[in-house]
């Protein structure tokens, strides 16, 4: 996929832009949506259908091509559900149709009696715990959104201080899971800074990442209500979102 270009007017969200009469605007909207939802879709397919990574990649690619060519996402009604719920519903329907077509081919064109015989790559179909699959989709979506926000924050960190702030953020917040834990004092020694300066720089970059996350979230929500619901969900709010 090509590098995503942010919309000049953040009120013109990607979800709304999917209905635009302008082809270039729709293409930008599609790029924003497919980039953020690629990993959730691919992970959901792989878990639900017990498929290989390559088969899941192929199925995800086919899904995005299908909904783009059919202009399916333009049919989204923000009054009925969150966009993410609508997209997952489209994905489930697509996978069932794909599975049915493949099984019909294997059986010489006849209709199948059950979907519980094989997955996309021939493995057993396992819809036994829809709740865990839904949670997987949600987790992958949150991770994809966070990673996109971090990329945006890094791209905007062009000055020396901003670059230092991002380096500290990367070292302390992003690499702690894969490296030995480090204290603010140790980080300060590593970068030649006082612990209080490290604290201030980390706070500044975390704020920038948070703002980038909210800006990215706003670009893929259709209404202000949906944006508030999603932001409360992401940032620890208690309000239960729709759909």
Image (spheres, rainbow, N blue to C red):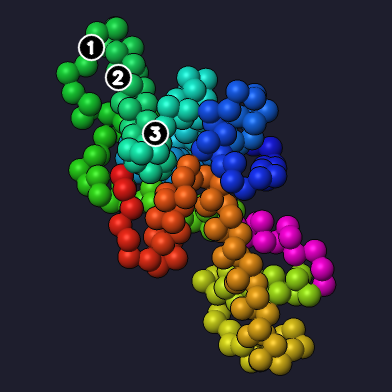
Membership of 207 in magenta stretch: no
Spatial CA span between label 1 and label 3 = 32 Å
> Can the viewer see residue 110?
yes
Q: Looking at the picture, does residue 114 appear above or below residue 216? A: above
Residue at the limit of the structure toward the left, as seen here: 113
The magenta stretch spans which residues? 149-160
Q: Are marks 2 and 3 in contact (CB under 8 Å)?
A: no
Q: Secondary structure at mark 3?
A: loop
Q: Give the quadrant of the C terminus.
A: top left
Q: Looking at the picture, does residue 102 appear above or below residue 135? A: above
* Residue 77 place in picture, x, y as percent: 39, 33
Sequence order check: which comes first, mark 2 or mark 3?
3
Rendering quarter of residue 171: bottom right
Mark 1 surroundings: few (<14), some (14-19) or many (≥20) residues within 10 A: few
* Residue 68 place in picture, x, y as percent: 52, 25
According to the image, label 2 marks what residue? 100
Q: Give the quadrant of the N terminus.
A: top right
Q: Main secondary structure of the magenta part?
A: helix
Membership of 152 in magenta stretch: yes
Q: Nearer the viewer, residue 119 or 64?
A: 64
């Amino acid at each position: 996929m090509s590098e995503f270009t942010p919309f000049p007017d953040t009120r013109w969200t990607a979800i709304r832009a999917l209905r635009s009469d302008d082809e270039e605007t729709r293409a930008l909207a599609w790029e924003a949506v497919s980039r953020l939802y690629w990993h959730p879709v691919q992970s959901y397919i792989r878990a639900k259908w017990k498929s290989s990574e390559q088969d899941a990649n192929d199925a995800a690619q086919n899904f995005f091509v299908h909904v783009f060519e059919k202009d399916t996402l333009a049919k989204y009604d923000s009054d009925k559900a969150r966009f993410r719920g609508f997209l997952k519903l489209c994905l489930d329907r697509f996978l069932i149709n794909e599975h049915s077509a493949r099984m019909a081919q294997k059986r010489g064109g006849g209709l199948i009696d059950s979907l519980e015989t094989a997955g996309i790559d021939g493995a057993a179909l396992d819809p036994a715990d829809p709740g865990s699959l839904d949670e997987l989709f949600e987790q992958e979506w949150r991770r994809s959104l966070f990673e996109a926000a971090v990329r945006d924050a890094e791209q905007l960190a062009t000055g020396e201080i901003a670059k230092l702030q991002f380096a500290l953020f990367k070292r302390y917040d992003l690499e702690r899971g894969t490296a030995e834990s480090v204290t603010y004092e140790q980080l300060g020694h590593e970068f030649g800074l006082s612990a209080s300066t490290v604290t201030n720089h980390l706070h500044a970059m975390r704020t920038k990442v948070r703002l980038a996350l909210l800006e990215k979230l706003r670009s893929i929500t259709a209404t202000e209500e949906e944006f508030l619901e999603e932001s409360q969900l992401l940032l620890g709010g208690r309000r239960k979102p729709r759909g």
